[in-house]
Amino acid sequence: MDIREIPEGCIEDSQGRFVPKDKIKPEDLQKDELVRELIQKAKGLRENLAHLKATALGDVRAHVDLVAERYDVKLGGKKGNISLLSYDGKFRVQVAVAERLVFDEKITIAKSLVDECLTDWTQDGREEIKLLITDAFQVDKEGCLNTGRILSLRKLDIRDERWQRAMTAISDSLSVHSTATYIRFYERQESDGKWLPISLDLAVV
C-alpha cells in the first residue's frame, strides 16, 4: 500500500484529508500529541513484555533440559506444563500449554441425534435437561460453538441409545486446532500462604 506524504505544517484527519495545523484548535493538537505519545509508550511496553516472555520461556526450557540431562529424566507435566518454585518457597514460575479444541463436521451428526432425543422427550417434562442441552449448542458472536459446554453433555447419565451415539460423535469430532503457551508469575503471601499472581495486565495493576 502506498504511504502518502503529509504536507509540511499539516496533519491528516479521520477522513484522510490534510488539515493545516493553524486551522486546528490547540486543545485538539495537544490531544493528538498526547494520544500518539501514549501509544508509542504502550507499543514499547508490549515489545518489552514479548521479550520477557520469550526470554523467560527459553530460560525455563534450558533449566528443564539441564536437569533432564543430569538425571536422565523428562521433567514437565502433561503436555509440557511446568512449575518452578524458588528455594524459599516464596515465588513460583508456571508454564502452561493450552490447546484450542475445535469440532469437525461430525458435530452436526451429534446435534441431529440430540435433537431427536429432545423431540421425544418433549412429553416427558425434562425441561431442565432440555434447556441445558439447547444452551450447549448455542454459538457465540463469532459463530463458534462453546467447546466446554458441549463436552459437559458427556457427563449426563442418559442411557438413550441415540444419546450415546451422539456423545460418541462429539468425541470423534474433536481435534486440536492450535496450542498456546503461557507463562505466569506468582508470589506467596506471608499472611495466609495464598499464591497471588504478579499481574502484567494494565487493567489490574
Image: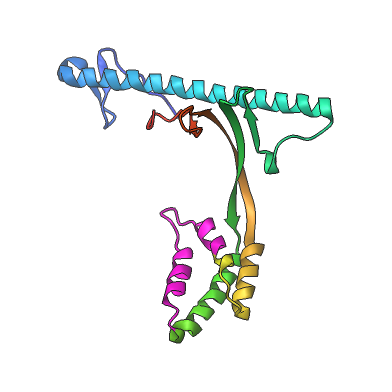
Q: Residue furthest top?
A: 8
- State the quadrant of the C terminus: top left
Q: Is residue 31 left or right of residue 111?
A: left
| 18 shown above or below 165 | above
Q: Residue furthest front?
A: 191
| 21 shown above or below 185 | above
Q: Give percent across and percent down for residue 160.
A: 60, 80
Q: Is residue 125 visible?
A: yes
Q: Is residue 24 visible?
A: no
Residue sitting nearer the eye, 135 or 44? 135
Q: Residue furthest right?
A: 72
**Residue 92, quarter of the rendered image:** top right
- State the quadrant of the N terminus: top left
Q: Give percent across and percent down for residue 71.
A: 83, 28
Residue beneath the point at 52% across and 29% down? 188
- Colour pattern of the rendering: rainbow
Residue beneath the point at 43% across and 26% down? 2
Report the magenta residues as a range: 125-152
Residue sitting nearer the eye, 43 or 87? 87
Q: Give percent across and percent down for residue 93.
A: 59, 29
Residue beneath the point at 25% across and 17% down? 10
Residue sitting nearer the eye, 71 or 64? 71
Q: Is residue 145 left or right of residue 97?
A: left
User: Is residue 151 inside the magenta stretch?
Assistant: yes
**How many numbered discs, if any?**
0
User: Is residue 84 inside the magenta stretch?
Assistant: no
Residue beneath the point at 26% across and 32% down? 15
Residue sitting nearer the eye, 92 or 14? 92
Q: Give percent across and percent down for residue 135.
A: 44, 65
